[in-house]
Amino acid sequence: MTSRLFSPIVLLLVLTFLIGPFLIIIAASLSAGETLAFPPQGLSLRWVFKVFEVESFRASFGISMFLAIGGTLAALILGIPASYALSRYKVPGAETIRTIVSSPIIVPGIIVGLALLRYFVVPFNFGILFALFMAHTALILPYAVRVVSASLNNLRSDIEEAAVLLGSSRVGAFFRVVMPNIRGGILAAFILGFVTSFNQVPVSLFLSGPGVRTLPIDMLSYMEITYDPSVAALSALLAFMSLGIVFLAERFLGFSRYV
Amino acid sequence: MFQNRAEAFALVLPAAIFASVVFLVPVGILLSEGFRTGDSWTIQAYIDFFSQSLNQTVFLRTLKLAAMVTAVSAVIGYAAAFAIVNLPPKGKGRITGLVVLPLMISPVARTYAWLVILGRTGFVNQALVGIGLSDEPIRFLFTETAVFIGLLQLFLPLMIISLISALENMPRDAVPAARVLGANWFQVFTKVILPLTKEGLVIGGTLVFTGSMTAYITPAILGGSKVLMLETLMYQRVTVANDFVAASVIALILIVMAFAANVLLKRLATARNKR
């Protein structure tokens, strides 16, 4: 009897702990009051609208979007050929190359950001935005290689060998035979990269300059000065955005198969 | 398998060179800075770092919090994963989805929620004062407890999903068989479930431990300058004091501890295996 009650109670407690704070954020963002509070003082959408009026949020949202989309595309452009070579060719030192390419996951992001600031931005006068772009690309690269490699390994290599035997060039075989078959994996890698980059804080921490900072960093600094519910509203909006993307991905390509 | 080496290198090198130039080389130089004073190589910076009591406190606190979060998430994780695995298939998928859901939400948003809950005028304090359990608001924010709670919420899903897949790979009859043979639940857990799922525990444990140790957002929001952890200390050293040597020392400590945790947990897993 006790064990029959045990499971539902455990699940209820764990889910309350994991999901509850998110629901509280949504409730707090609908408050009509001046300060952050739960339960909210009256209901209104004023803070949700306020989010769109804050100039710095608009600017940093644009930068985060650019980094998430551009960085992921760059990581895929570098990562797809590398994954292809690692799964279809005998590459000397394949393990070393794999380690090098996936190293940005292992080392804490804050160190990467600091190192780029100190040895790229300062001495070579690189722009902050350029450094951010490089850092985000490096950060997404391991995910791109892992997800694309997985879907390449699930694809039998005889079909492209058959295409080559039938007279197609290697490049032609890749674009006409391999690419259409790993499209789902590439899309999954894109979504994973996008979400990772968009939510990323430590890498971008040191890489922020006048007018150039990512949205999460901007939220952190806004929180330090103001205690109004607009950050809660923004958090809720962003959460719905990520969840929407992941939900659509799951719906149309079975995202979780790839990740 | 294609044999053409030149082609293989042409495909793989751009990614490898990019990761080296943007990542390995700058990080390498940063790490070397902690060992240099002028022209000579020394470990003086490390001696200086560990001789300051603030740094010792932060170092030990980081280790302690990461270990506590890992241990507690393992206990909760087993209970939750066990409950989920025994659900009917449809419910299993849905509940697993709900567990994974927070991972897709920005950690800033997830940590921010705790401000609303634990703050001075927050939900918990209103309830405590309202019921009459406390006369005035209790200070939760900027304590180790707040950071612990925040980290646990952030990383618990990783432990649960690691344990779910481990429990699912366990032979179906193992637990009922042990029960029939007279083992109590404690024995079932230590003698059957734990040995059979230790790989999942190690994977989850490594993710949670290194994640908590290298967390920045949670200690920054919920700990502030009162409860510094290694990453917030590093940020402070750089922005307040321009002290890149200390930053380099902290960077190496973080990397070494992450690797050490990885190796140690793997060892633990294989050691139990031999018995």
Image: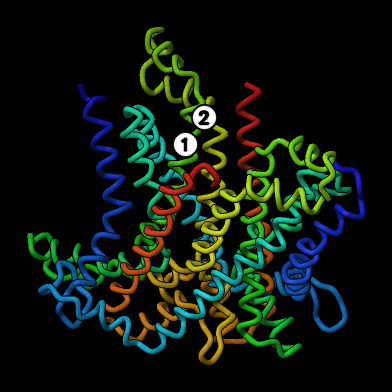
**Left or right: B87 in relation to B46:** left
Q: Is residue A120 visible?
A: yes
Residue count near mark 2 (Cα–Cα under 10 Å), binned few <14, some 14–19, many ≥20: many
Q: What residue is pinned by disc 2?
A: B197
**Left or right: A88 in relation to B172:** right
Q: Are marks 2 and 1 in contact (CB under 8 Å)?
A: yes
**Left or right: A144 in relation to B230:** right
Q: What kind of residue is marked 2?
A: Thr
Q: Is residue B177 above or below residue A186?
A: above
Q: What residue is pinned by disc 1?
A: B163
Q: Is residue A168 above or below residue A210?
A: above
Where's residue B67, x and y in %?
50, 50
Pick whichever, A100 or A240, lies toward us: A240
Pick whichever, A102 or A118, lies toward us: A102
Residue beneath the point at 79% across and 43% down: A88
Q: What kind of residue is marked 1?
A: Leu
Image quarter of residue B78? top left
Q: Is residue B50 visible?
A: no
Looking at the image, is mark 2 or mark 1 earlier in the sequence? 1
Q: Is residue B155 above or below residue A108?
A: above
Residue count near mark 1 (Cα–Cα under 10 Å), binned few <14, some 14–19, many ≥20: many
**Left or right: A3 in relation to A189:** left
Q: Quadrant of the N terminus of chain A?
A: top left
Pick whichever, B76 or A215, lies toward us: A215
Secondary structure beneath disc 1? helix
Where's residue B260, x and y in %?
66, 50
Where's residue A175, x and y in %?
71, 53
Q: Which chain is disc 1 placed on?
A: B
